[in-house]
Image: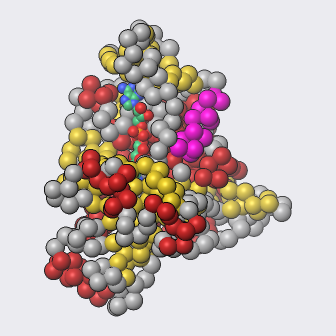
């Protein structure tokens, strides 16, 4: 069948909504559906990283989201005897991405802002109350069977849509993932937890801790997170023999909170028990179908990374899909999606599990030993560690320039490229808004800027941006980029559309070589179109 849509997205949660916005604003014909009629009205995720705010900015929703976010307070870890054993914080200003690096947010209005943005894109068709119930693919297209109407209603109707590619963003129990035969690998975490959200009143706020807490107590490990405004979140591990259903009743929730507050201190927003898992899809692609977000991975909530990972997935996949649909790259480029993202998810999940192991030690003797070891490591004085330090770099298929950087003693390719504030008259503007968010060659050297071959700029549709003091250059406000270039011992960076560094160079010759290698690699992925590039 002839595809009507370039890409169909199954699931309009945060992952699907960001994918729809990215693809829609790139001009692709997109269909996105969700079996629900509206945004789920309770928060699940509570924390986000600056990388995600950068993507929100890219899709034009930052201003709509800002009223619903606040800086994440420090998280203090206390040990068996109530002593401070560890502290996670936010990096100090100037911020590397020009956003607060770690924020808490209110998920329902943020999801609504994402959906409103998608609704404004004429080339994106949104089908709410529409459940995907079947999928068939051939060499050219994928056909989705949809059932419309209230869940379980007898007068539901059906229809079919045809797209060239499908992204399954249909959550943890993804029907599409199962339908295309993608299995999940178990990364070894399976625990019952109770999650309680409270809207605290003035009395409650006065009684509660003023920073977020990790209670690393063997009897009952738990987290307390200061959400935006008066939202407070507890994630409390359940003990063997406790009934998750009973614990998730109002009575069970208030009982679990007696250590901190009583019903006079606020109202329950919601309480739910979960089994937290660590899972990753074995394959991220089956023919023309890709998995993303919770459909591709689940991780324990320590460090608040699940939703962030979903946004990283689609930020990685969507520019590749756009390049393939615009015939600027071939199908092989799409294989790099799973290679890059799966490894990143595995590495980050291992680090999250490591943090979880610190928090969740249930043996009192081992927990005391943990406390002593952590305190010994820092010489008895706990120093706050930036949360962002846990992020692994991206590795794999498209990032091939590592050897240059390895020689310099560190690896830059696959790390996030910083974003400075640029001085524009009396105003400050974030660099992405001036440089665009496609491929970028950013340099602090006029000679390097001049060296970029025009043919490469045409192929990549890249922008070359010089940051510096001469007339042609943009002037940064805080020296974020200048110190980054110094640290990386380079003068130019090739930046991907998902804001990751593809490669860096210290000389014009090295830069041109890197660019040619990149162009060749993209062209090689599409022999049929190579001549047209
Ligand atoms: C307690 C808890 C705390 C968390 N804290 C954080 C945090 O602080 N930070 C963070 O980044 N993440 C956190 N997460 C994880 C985060 O909530 C999820 O990773 C994120 O919501 C997943 O988004 P998604 O769009 O991939 O999937 P979902 O939000 O599950 O969306 C999937 C969508 O697909 C739809 N759908 C399903 N099947 C079909 C079908 N057949 N047809 C059509 N539509 C379908 C569903 O209706 C749904 O809207 C937390 C999770 C939990 C449970």
Residue at 24 percent across and 53 percent down: it is 192
Residue 353 in view, yes or no: yes
Horizontally, is 107 left or right of 430 in the view?
left
Q: Is residue 522 left or right of residue 461?
A: left
Q: Residue 240 in the image: x percent, y percent?
A: 16, 58
Q: Residue at left 70%, top 65%? A: 476
Question: Residue 454: horizontal and vertical position, in percent?
Answer: 64, 42
Q: Is residue 139 visible to us here?
A: no
Q: Nearer the viewer, residue 532 or 412?
A: 412
Judged from the image, the quadrant occupied by ligand 1 is top left
Q: Position of residue 93 (x, y in %)?
A: 60, 72
- What residue lies at 37% left-to-right and 51% top-to-bottom? 250
Which residue is situated farthest in the right direction here? 425
Camera-side residue: 126 or 1?
A: 126
Which quadrant of the view contains residue 392? bottom left
Range shown magenta:
108-121
Q: Is residue 212 above or below residue 141?
A: below
Please check the rendered image and state whether residue 182 is part of the magenta-colored stretch, yes or no.
Answer: no
Q: How many numbered marks have been drawn onto this rendered protein structure?
A: 0
Give the quadrant of the C terminus.
top right
């Amino acid at each position: 069948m002839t595809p009507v849509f370039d890409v169909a997205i199954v699931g309009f949660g945060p992952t699907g909504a960001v994918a729809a916005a990215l693809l829609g604003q790139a001009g692709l014909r997109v269909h996105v559906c969700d079996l629900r009629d509206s945004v789920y009205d309770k928060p699940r995720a509570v924390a986000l990283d600056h990388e995600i705010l950068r993507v929100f900015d890219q899709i034009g929703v930052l201003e709509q989201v800002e009223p619903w976010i606040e800086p994440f307070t420090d998280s203090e870890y206390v040990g068996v005897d109530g002593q401070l054993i560890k502290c996670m914080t936010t990096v100090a200003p100037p911020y590397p991405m020009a956003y607060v690096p770690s924020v808490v947010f209110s998920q329902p209005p943020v999801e609504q802002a994402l959906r409103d943005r998608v609704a404004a894109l004429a080339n994106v068709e949104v089908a709410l109350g529409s459940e995907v119930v079947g999928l068939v693919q051939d060499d050219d297209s994928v056909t989705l069977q949809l059932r419309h109407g209230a869940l379980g209603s007898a007068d539901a109707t059906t229809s079919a849509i045809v797209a060239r590619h499908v992204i399954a963003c249909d959550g943890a129990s993804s029907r599409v993932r199962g339908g295309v035969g993608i299995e999940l690998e178990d990364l070894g975490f399976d625990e019952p937890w109770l999650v309680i959200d409270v809207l605290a009143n003035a009395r409650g706020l006065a009684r509660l801790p003023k920073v977020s807490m990790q209670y690393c107590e063997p009897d009952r490990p738990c987290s307390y997170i200061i959400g935006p405004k008066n939202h407070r979140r507890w994630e409390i591990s359940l003990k063997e023999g406790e009934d998750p259903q009973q614990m998730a009743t109002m009575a069970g929730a208030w009982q679990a909170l007696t250590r901190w507050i009583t019903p006079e201190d606020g109202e329950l927003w919601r309480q739910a028990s979960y089994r937290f898992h660590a899972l990753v899809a074995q394959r991220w692609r089956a023919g023309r179908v890709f998995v993303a977000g919770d459909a591709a991975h689940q991780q324990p909530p320590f460090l608040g990374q699940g939703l962030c990972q979903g946004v990283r997935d689609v930020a990685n996949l969507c520019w590749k899909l756009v390049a393939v649909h615009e015939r600027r790259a071939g199908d092989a480029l799409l294989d790099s999606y799973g290679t890059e993202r799966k490894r990143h998810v595995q590495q980050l999940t291992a680090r999250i599990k490591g943090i979880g192991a610190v928090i969740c030690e249930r043996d009192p003797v081992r927990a005391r030993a943990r406390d002593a070891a952590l305190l010994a490591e820092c010489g008895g004085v706990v120093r706050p560690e930036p949360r962002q330090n846990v992020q692994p770099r991206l590795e794999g298929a498209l990032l091939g320039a590592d050897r240059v950087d390895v020689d310099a003693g560190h690896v830059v390719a696959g790390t996030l490229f910083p974003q400075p504030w640029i001085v524009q008259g009396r105003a400050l503007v974030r660099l992405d808004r001036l440089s665009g968010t496609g491929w970028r060659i950013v340099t602090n050297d006029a000679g390097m800027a001049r060296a970029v071959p025009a043919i490469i700029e045409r192929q990549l549709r890249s922008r070359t941006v010089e940051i510096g003091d001469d007339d042609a250059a943009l002037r940064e406000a805080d020296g974020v980029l200048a110190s980054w270039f110094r640290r990386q011992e380079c003068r130019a960076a090739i930046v991907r559309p998902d804001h990751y560094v593809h490669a860096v160079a210290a000389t014009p010759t090295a830069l041109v070589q890197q660019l040619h290698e990149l162009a060749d690699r993209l062209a090689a992925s599409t022999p049929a179109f190579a001549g047209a590039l």
